[in-house]
Image (cartoon, helix red, strand yellow):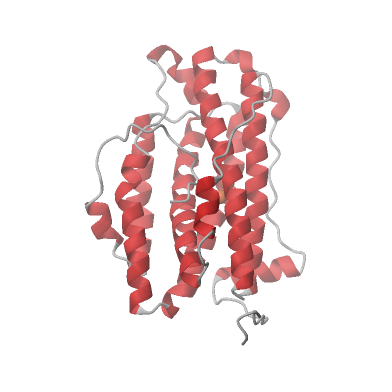
Amino acid sequence: MSAGLVEVRRILTATPLARQHQLRVAGKATRRPKPIPWNDFDRQQFSPEARALALDAFKQIAIGEYGAVQMYAQLTAAMALAGLPLDLLTAAASICSDEARHADYALRMAAAIAGHDVPVSVDKEPLESPWRKEVTLETLDAAVLHVAAISETIACALIGACHERSSDATVGALHANLVADEVHHARFGWYYLSWRAPQWTQAERQRLADRMASNVVGIERRFWWGRDASATHEPAARALGVLESEGRRLAVREIMESEIVPALDSFGLGASHAWQKRLRGGNPRPPRGEHELD
Ligand SMILES: [Fe+2]
Ligand SMILES: [Fe+2]
């Protein structure tokens, strides 16, 4: 095969993504967003302090979701150039479209809370830099591991915790849509790894394990701070799905220990060791988007 050509075959993985792909091909993909009752939201029911915390949270979500659009677009393009199985391509491309819809939800919710349009600024450098170097299958493995498998699984836990708190119907419906989609994004990550892991050489597995470890040791610290309302405004903040520091730490620790670390261990990446050696305590940096690419 010439270096300038990509060999394209009609191949699928032996994972459940193949079945989803076949449903898409047959026009039978069934996942649809649930309606969000935007007109029911009344910003005046919430104190300015609670609104400020929720506004900050939705702006961060919008930044993360928008960044994820670029990430999955790059990933889809790179997977196409590498000639990967078609079910991986349709899954990644559909995640890209989900993330643009999530960015829309978050911007719309931010505007509803603020009472006016709220633009956000997305830093291009961390989105572009991983793709400036030569993109190999190992680059794709690392991107999928960090962004889809680890970050999307953490996103499920964090948004799930926000959803448990949110008693407002509009915010709750928004969170329910996000969780329903992020579960599929996380599964894409884990299924990709289960397809790829048997192909890794010992050296490839070790390099990925090293990159995984440098991510995992810093996860607790990165997600240490939530948004803490004063006692008077705490019920209103909860109703808007604002996640306090304690709840955020608990959600991250639980999902790491119950799902992420065991799954990474099952691929021979030695995550238990990295998790035991993790950096403890807070990082002075404010929370970032949930779809960060390290
Ligand atoms: Fe998302
Ligand atoms: Fe996602």
Image-based side of 20 in relation to 262, left or right: right
Nearer to us in this view, 263 or 101: 101
Q: Quadrant of residue 35?
A: top right
Question: Residue 197: x, y in percent?
Answer: 43, 74
The one nearer the camera, 154 or 206, is 206
Residue placed at 32% from the left, 55% from the top?
Answer: 214
Reply above or below: 25 against 218: below
Q: Position of residue 118 (x, y in %)?
A: 64, 26
143 displayed left or right of 209: right
Residue closer to the observer: 136 or 39: 136
The x and y percentages for residue 250 are: 34, 39
Picture coordinates of residue 283 (x, y %)?
Answer: 32, 35
Please say whether residue 40 is visible from this viewpoint: yes
In depth, the one of 180 and 205 nearer the eye is 205
Q: How many marks?
A: 0
- x 36%, y 63%: residue: 264
Q: Residue at x 52, y 27 (%)?
A: 56
**Residue plotted at (70% across, 57% down):** 30
- 80 w.r.t. 291: above or below: below
Please say if 133 is above or below 58: below
Residue farthest to the bottom? 1
**Is residue 268 among what the camera can see?**
no
Quadrant of image for the N terminus: bottom right
